[in-house]
Amino acid sequence: MTPIFTPTDDDIDDDLPLADTGEVLELVLTPDLSGDRLDRALLPLLGEMSRARLQALIAEGRLSLDGQPVTDGKHKAKAGTYTLTIPAPIAAIPEPQDMKLEVLFEDAHLIVINKPAGMAAHPAPGTPDGTLVNALLFHCGDTLSGIGGVLRPGIVHRLDKDTSGVMVAAKSDAAHRGLSELFSRHDIDRAYEALVRGSPKSPSATVTTRIGRSPHDRKKMAVLKTGGREAITHYRVLESFGTAATRVRCTLETGRTHQIRVHMAHLGCPCLGDPVYGSGAPAKPVAEALREQGFTRQALHAAHLGFVHPITGEKLSFEAPLPEDMSALYSALKGLN
């Protein structure tokens, strides 16, 4: 049996939910509501959920009281705080979709594309279709089916939905194994360009931290003192726009979820337009440039990808220029000098 590899972490992985645990609800059953059957007593606290759905969740052991599972909804309800875990919906098998792809390289084993901003890497809750996987299934046909898993065929690394740039996908099991090993060993060159708020203290430096899920917001990643995983980013300033904004190039030694976005925010220079890590307002001229350009995504672009072809041994290197929206924002920022 061919081993199935899961996609590697990447620094910009916003299109994949950080946790696939669904929703956890706390239901407070007051004494005046106790005494009835448990499923009937809890139902008014669950909005539009059907009684049959609640009974199924209880039978699956997803309801607990004081940490102890409650598996029979027919029992008499006791007052207290119940915890109900609602699993995330299972995604449907992706369908091929005829979508335009900018192909930078393709052979029998792999394909390299310049992913546009706004395209998720693969289906996920909230993004059921219109993804790179849907486009690849159409473009590559049956050769892609099942490689790396049914729901994410061919995917070995990911870019955020709203991050543009170079991305590689596997078309054969052998290529998938080989690419996964390259990413796992960090034996792959990745460079990104970002337009960030303010200016880093040093024109070039290495940022080394541990990154893990934020203890304050489970949907975000954060720099942690303990726990998490080591994350190393090398950056250098390409151009400064006064002290209001900067164009930087970041190269990765590791590829953790949201790594560049978290590290630049950690330096006090979040990516412009970042809806998750861009807390704080930019300088007024920068805010005006963002507004005039209608720029509402993180200004981050995967500009370079280089690796040794896992089958042929050929050294491959790919560059993608800034996309139109980010290039227009860059031009507007240049006018601030």
Image (spheres, helix red, strand yellow):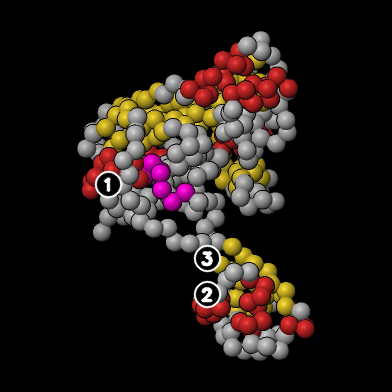
**Front of the two marks 2 and 3:** 2
Residue at 52 percent across and 75 percent down: it is 53
Q: Amino acid at mark 3?
A: Pro
Regarding mark 3 in the picture, which secondary structure is present there?
loop
According to the image, label 3 marks what residue?
87
Residue at 68 percent across and 22 percent down: it is 288
According to the image, label 2 marks what residue?
53
Quadrant for the N terminus, please.
bottom left
Label 1 and label 3: CA atoms lie apart by 29 Å
User: Of marks 2 and 3, which one's residue comes earlier in the chain?
Assistant: 2
Regarding mark 1 in the picture, which secondary structure is present there?
helix
Q: Nearer the viewer, residue 44 or 39?
A: 44
Q: Assess whether mark 3 and mark 2 are in contact (beta carbons under 8 angstroms).
A: no
Q: Amino acid at mark 2?
A: Arg
According to the image, label 1 marks what residue?
144
Q: Is residue 20 above or below residue 71?
A: above
Quarter assignment of residue 224 = top right
Q: Nearer the viewer, residue 315 or 118?
A: 118
Q: Nearer the viewer, residue 148 or 312?
A: 148
Residue 320 shown left or right of residue 163 in the figure: left
Percent x, y of residue 197: 66, 25
Q: Is residue 320 above or below residue 84?
A: above
